[in-house]
Image (spheres, rainbow, N blue to C red):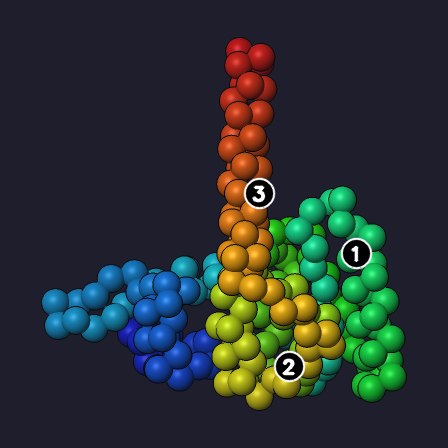
Amino acid sequence: MFLSIGQAANMLGVSLSSLRRWEREGFLLPSYRTFGGHRRYKLETLERIFPVSSSELNSAPEQSVIAYARVSSHDQKSDLETQKLKLSAYCKENFGNFELISDLGSGLNYRKPGLKKLLRLIFLRKVSCLVLNHKDRLLRFGSEIIFDLCKHFGVKVQILEEPMAQGFEQELASDVIELMTVFSSKLYGRRSHQNRKAVAA
């Protein structure tokens, strides 16, 4: 089943301009365009990217504060716990009730379970405030898209600590290292899978 841009916007609870902007940014592309140039979105694609379960719809509080923490790898678990402690202390002092969501995965991975849950709650209008330790804990690239979503849905974003200022070269080097780490992991994982298949054969 395919939806028009208006139907897709109504389903997701966003404006037409948001869908057009997401297309320009490569975040959400229409499945095809008609001969008249009208966008068409596949329903299954929208449901896969923005899954909403009935249990989440019914169990999620009316409005809640969400604290989100993330680290990139297993050897950073201590940093993840530090993030959680800081977020919990801040939220207990300022909000009382809150939910803590955490992820262990690359800042380039848009499919982390915690991030997907956060997006679902935002689209369900169940989030009043999003609390982060650092801006890049959300995503390494593309966090501005999610901040724009928060603005659209009336979600206040609270960032506890601003990162230390970096020069252009230092910031570029950090981005390159992040990219190399992700692609190296994919390459080694693929080789490992091929080796296991060869041994099994």
- The answer to which of marks 3 and 2 sits earlier in the sequence is 2
Return the residue at label 3.
Answer: 181
Is residue 156 shown above or below 100? Answer: below
Residue at 35 percent of width and 82 percent of height = 17
Circle count: 3
Q: Position of residue 88 (x, y in %)?
A: 84, 72
For residue 169, side relative to residue 2 (left or right): right
State the CA–CA distance, disc 3 to disc 2. Answer: 29 Å
What's under tag 3, amino acid-wise? Thr
Q: Please, what secondary structure does the residue beneath circle 3 have?
A: helix
Return the residue at label 2.
Answer: 157
- The answer to which of marks 1 and 2 sits earlier in the sequence is 1
State the CA–CA distance, disc 3 to disc 1. Answer: 18 Å
What's under tag 2, amino acid-wise? Val
- The crowding category of the residue bearing disc 1, from other C-alpha atoms within 10 Å (few below 14, some 14 to 19, many at least 20), is some
Is mark 3 in CB contact (under 8 Å) with mark 2?
no
Q: Position of residue 40 (x, y in %)?
A: 27, 68
Residue at 77 percent of width and 69 percent of height = 100
Which of 99/160 is in front? 160
Is mark 3 in CB contact (under 8 Å) with mark 1?
no
Q: Please, what secondary structure does the residue beneath circle 1 have?
A: helix
Which of 118/11 is in front? 118
Which of 185/16 is in front? 185
Return the residue at label 1.
Answer: 79
For residue 175, side relative to residue 136 (left or right): left
